[in-house]
Amino acid sequence: MIKKVIISACLLISFVSFAQQGTASPYSFFGIGDIRFKGTLENRSMAGVAVEQDSIHLNIENPASYASLMQTTFTVGGTFATSNLKTSTQSEKAQRTTFDYLALGIPMGKFGASFGLIPVSSVGYKILNNNPDTEGALNSQFDGKGGVNKVYFGLGYKITKGWNIGADAQYNFGKITTTTVEGITGVQNSTAEVNTAELSGMAFSIGTMYQKKIYKKTSVFSSLSYTFGSSLNADNTRVISVQGDPDPYVQPVDSKTLKLPNKLSIGLGIGEARKWLVGANMTFQGDGDLRNYYNTAENVSYESYSKYAVGGYYLPNYNSFTSYMSRITYRAGLKYEKIGLIVNNESIKDIGMTIGAGVPIPGSFSNVNFGIEFGKRGTVSSNLVQENYVNFSVSFSFNDRWFVKSKFQ
């Protein structure tokens, strides 16, 4: 069953994963766009807390977790995002439906492996500045789309019953296109500038997870992962054209090497496996060098990224035969992020809350997960944009036993 699901999902996602516009944030103009990947929905519903060595849910934020899988696990998720973008004088609404991730985890004794496809960042904005009633006024339109995706392969190993280590390799790739159209009221022809960056590069991560029982059924959990700084090659082109001119001018632009920063994530938690968990995660990342020739501005600078999250889950009775509601997992969390961007001397922050539920599929270890995330990014002060957002997410986690020999008597 799971093999048929994987094939169908891969065929569907091949049509949408590279064409989607995964954000409507004006802040996605900078760097490689709005960083979208926040883990699987099970972890996102706890604001990103991912410290438990789960045997049936895939944790793709720490490769050490793969060694704890007991069944082959396939997971796929998507989000319907709504946001209200406002300044001190105006407001606009935006909606997006996006693919979030597709991943497969395979247990192999003391080893565990995983591979998948994940959109890492998205660029998606449209900014208009029109003055149609003023003769000689400058009118402009700015559009951006694209982003960075990654395919990854990871391997985990169980050193002892409670201690795992792991590593993965990632290939990052994508394309970002920005378009600027400018014209003057009363003048027939406008000019357009289209900048395209083809992006590619490798990255590597390592991780470890440890858990220890401290009292009867209660255990402490810890997680540590580190992503090494890496390079992202940008092959740049610029095309300038005048409306009605059949021969646009292709301007040579030097290629550039962007520097992706290193990232450290630390998690701690306490709980009872398959019953309850309370945990916290801290993530720190350098500012790197993500400036390309088309996305620099005098009023913009970069700083180190940081995130603090607390969250957990509660599962009333995972093996109840009489109450289906008792087998639903309830999740919640809070987060605070500094996204690493400073505009008009304002550090851009993202504050949010998450809630979710994991609904089991009868007769299996598979489940359907639902999550809601709502929060605020940015501010209306200093002539900036504040984004009030609500994200509705759903994911499917299918579990099955592979590579098991049938026995006949």
Image (cartoon, rainbow, N blue to C red):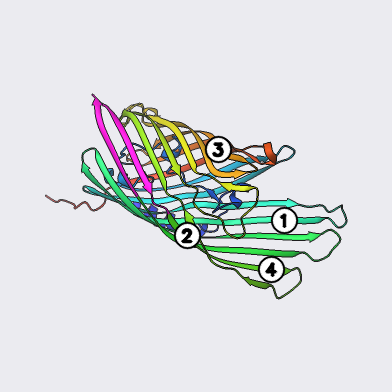
Q: Tag 1: Cα neighbours inside 10 Å, few (<14), some, or many (≥20)? A: some
C-alpha gap between disc 1 and disc 4: 15 Å
Residue 242 x, y percent position in the rendering: 74, 69
Which residue is under mark 1?
A: 141
Q: Tag 3: Cα neighbours inside 10 Å, few (<14), some, or many (≥20)? A: some
Residue 251 x, y percent position in the rendering: 64, 71
Question: Between disc 2 and disc 3, whose residue precedes?
Answer: 2
Residue 339 visible in the current orientation? yes
Which residue is outermost to the top? 215
The amino acid type, in three-letter code, at marker 1 is Gln
In the figure, residue 314 lies in which quadrant? top left
Span colored in magenta? 206-229
Q: Reply above or below: 21 against 389.
A: below
Q: Reply above or below: 197 against 343.
A: below
C-alpha gap between disc 4 and disc 2: 25 Å
Element under disc 4: strand
Disc nearest the viewer among 1 and 4: 4
C-alpha gap between disc 3 and disc 1: 27 Å
Q: Is residue 215 magenta?
A: yes
Depth check, front residue: 4 or 53: 53
Question: Between disc 1 and disc 4, whose residue precedes?
Answer: 1
Q: Tag 4: Cα neighbours inside 10 Å, few (<14), some, or many (≥20)? A: some
Element under disc 2: strand
Question: Between disc 1 and disc 2, whose residue precedes?
Answer: 1
| Proximity of marks 4 and 3: CB atoms separated by less than 8 Å | no
The amino acid type, in three-letter code, at marker 4 is Ile
| Proximity of marks 3 and 1: CB atoms separated by less than 8 Å | no
Dominant SS in magenta:
strand
Which residue is under mark 4?
A: 240
Which residue is under mark 3?
A: 350
Question: Between disc 3 and disc 1, whose residue precedes?
Answer: 1
On screen, residue 113 versus residue 349, left or right, reads left
